[in-house]
Image (cartoon, rainbow, N blue to C red):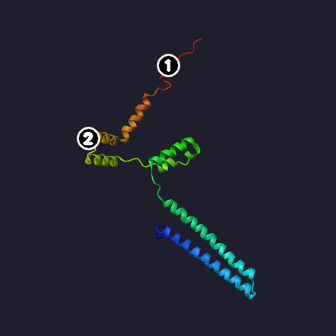
Amino acid sequence: MNWVKDNRLLLLFAAVVLTTLGTVGIGIVGVVATLGALLGGGAVVQTFATFLLGTLLLVGVDIVLSVALVRALARRASVPKSQRVAGGLGRLESIIPPLASLGLSDVFAPPEPTVEERHEALTRRYVEGELSEAEYERELQALLGEGERTETELLDDDIATDLSRPTATDTEYEPARE
């Protein structure tokens, strides 16, 4: 079963080719048999109907397999990531709200770089001479400080934010003046 799953596209392609060739072959044989029955005085309608039914059946199978192949290819295709395209789609989604349900701007948005990728880019800029040693150290400290924040620190920030918000008990009750 694993081999079939691994070679699904190849098998679908082979099935489409074979059903297409079979459809053409049955169609040609049907035309020749119908002409033979017509010239020889045989049952023309029965011969034509038999080959027409076979041809239509193979056309149906061919269409189903072709759709399955196109669907499998579309799922496998990679969508190019572009911040420009994602931004344009985001603006379009804000103008036409029903488009937002499709989430196209998220599909085309490039992934956020990880701390490791940003560190590599920073090191490359330093090696290429775009940054001085002091600028490199400053940006590296900011990057490492950002990467070292743990979940507990983020949770502590959320708790501190929640505690700083006024609650219903924090406000004093003032009776209405008459």
Q: Residue at x 48, y 67 (%)?
A: 5
Q: Which residue is mark 1?
A: 172
Q: Is residue 100 left or right of residue 109?
A: right
**In the displayed structure, would residue 11 be above or below residue 131?**
below
Is residue 65 or residue 124 the one in the foreground? Answer: 124
For the residues labelled 1 and 2, the Cα–Cα distance comes to: 51 Å
Q: Amino acid at mark 2?
A: Glu
User: What mark, if any, has residue 58 been given in the picture?
Assistant: none
Mark 1 and mark 2 in contact? Answer it, CB < 8 Å. no
The structure residue drawn at horizontal position 32% and vertical position 42%, both measured from the top left corner, is 143
Q: Residues within 10 Å of mark 2 (few under 14, many from 20)?
A: some
Residue 118 vertical position relative to residue 37 in the rendered view, above or below: above
Label 1 neighbourhood size at 10 Å, few (<14), some (14-19), many (20+)? few
What percent of the width, then of the height, locates residue 73? 51, 63
The residue at which mark 2 appears reads as 137
Element on which disc 2 rests: helix
Residue 2's spot in the image, x, y percent?
Answer: 46, 68
